[in-house]
């Protein structure tokens, strides 16, 4: 029996074949799990997500549009999922947003209120909103795993990460409080702090190339993280092997976070 056989869940964040969410879904599928997918509204976004999902060997994927900044969209996608699935074992939250104008070294101090609040709304509050909507079906399924993606810039200053670092700090704290609230229902909530990966979202960060260049010099493993590294850890957190792990932030960054002066 495969590790994740019989488990099914909803994945947010597959933008293309390089997305962390894509690598996570690949690992889950390879281990016998099944994934339903959310995509940003619009035909172009649907096509891009569908293409990435087909690359995972899924030709008949369940896809639905969702603008995570909209409460109604979130309610609608969970309602659609509930109407077509018997259980919900996991939710993958791999979405984030910050206006790229303010993701440049030295510009954090100028971040306007609107950009600050939108980053926290989409990158952090949405985890809480999704957890609330997932709770009833996940509880009926006997528990489950909710997983979100973070980054080291939530703890240390990474030039150019700016307000996204603030949002990721909020995300990690949100996960801990959710873990406490949902634990009695058998629902676990964790975050993965992945190393920098050249994704569509990461390209908006002004210092991303510096991060990618510096990591192999600082990291104990002397390399950048790969999508499959995070995918494997996510599959473990979705599985019953991690049944006593909740409220944790798991580093998958080749060890960068343990090094003084690392980026």
Image (cartoon, helix red, strand yellow):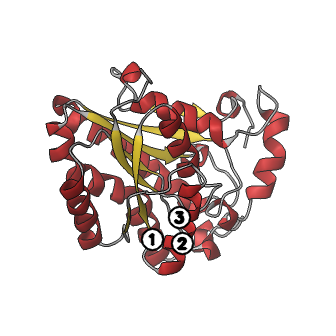
Q: Which residue is mark 1?
A: 40
Q: What percent of the width, then of the height, locates residue 184? A: 16, 29
Residue labelled with disc 3:
49
Q: Helix or strand or loop: what does disc 1 sit on?
A: loop
Do the numbered discs 1 and 3 sit on residues whose CB atoms are within 8 Å?
A: yes
Image depth: mark 1 or mark 2 in front? 2
How many neighbours does mark 2 have within 10 angstroms: few (below 14), some (14-19), or many (20 or more)? some
User: Disc 2 designates what residue?
Assistant: 47
Q: CA distance from mark 3 to mark 2?
A: 5 Å
Give SS at disc 2. Answer: helix
Mark 1 or mark 3, which is nearer to you? Answer: 3
| Residue 141 rendering spot, x and y as whole percentages | 19, 36
Q: Quadrant of the C terminus?
A: top right
Which of 58/229 is in front?
58
Question: Which of 228/149 is in front?
Answer: 228
Q: Quadrant of residue 41?
A: bottom left
Q: Locate residue 214: give its quadrant.
A: top right
Left or right? Give the position of 230 relative to 236: right
Say which label, 1 or 2, has the lower sequence index: 1
Residue 13, percent from left and from top: 49, 58
Asked if residue 168 is positioned above or below residue 46 in the image, the reply reads: above
Is the Cβ of the residue at disc 3 closer than 8 Å to that at disc 2?
yes
């Amino acid at each position: 029996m495969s590790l994740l056989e019989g488990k099914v869940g909803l994945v947010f964040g597959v933008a293309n074949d390089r997305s962390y969410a894509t690598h996570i879904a690949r690992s889950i599928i390879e281990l016998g799990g099944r994934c339903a997918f959310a995509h940003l509204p619009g035909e172009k976004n649907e096509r891009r997500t569908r293409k990435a999902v087909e690359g995972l060997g899924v030709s008949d994927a369940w896809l639905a549009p969702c603008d995570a900044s909209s409460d109604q969209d979130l309610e609608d996608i969970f309602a659609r999922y509930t109407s077509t699935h018997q259980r919900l074992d996991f939710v993958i939250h791999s979405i984030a947003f910050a206006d790229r104008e303010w993701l440049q070294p030295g510009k954090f101090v100028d971040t306007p209120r609107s950009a600050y609040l939108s980053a926290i709304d989409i990158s952090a509050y949405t985890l809480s909103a999704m957890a609330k909507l997932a709770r009833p079906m996940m509880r009926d399924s006997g528990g489950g795993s909710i997983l979100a993606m973070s980054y080291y810039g939530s703890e240390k200053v990474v030039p150019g990460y700016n307000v996204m670092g603030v949002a990721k700090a909020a995300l990690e704290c949100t996960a801990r409080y959710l873990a406490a609230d949902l634990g009695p229902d058998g629902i676990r909530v964790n975050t993965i702090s992945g190393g920098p990966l050249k994704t569509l979202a990461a390209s908006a960060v002004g210092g991303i190339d510096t991060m990618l260049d510096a990591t192999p010099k600082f990291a104990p493993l002397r390399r950048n993280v790969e999508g499959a590294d995070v995918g494997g850890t996510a599959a473990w957190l979705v599985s019953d092997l991690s049944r006593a792990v909740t409220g944790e932030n798991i580093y998958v960054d080749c060890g960068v976070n343990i090094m003084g002066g690392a980026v």
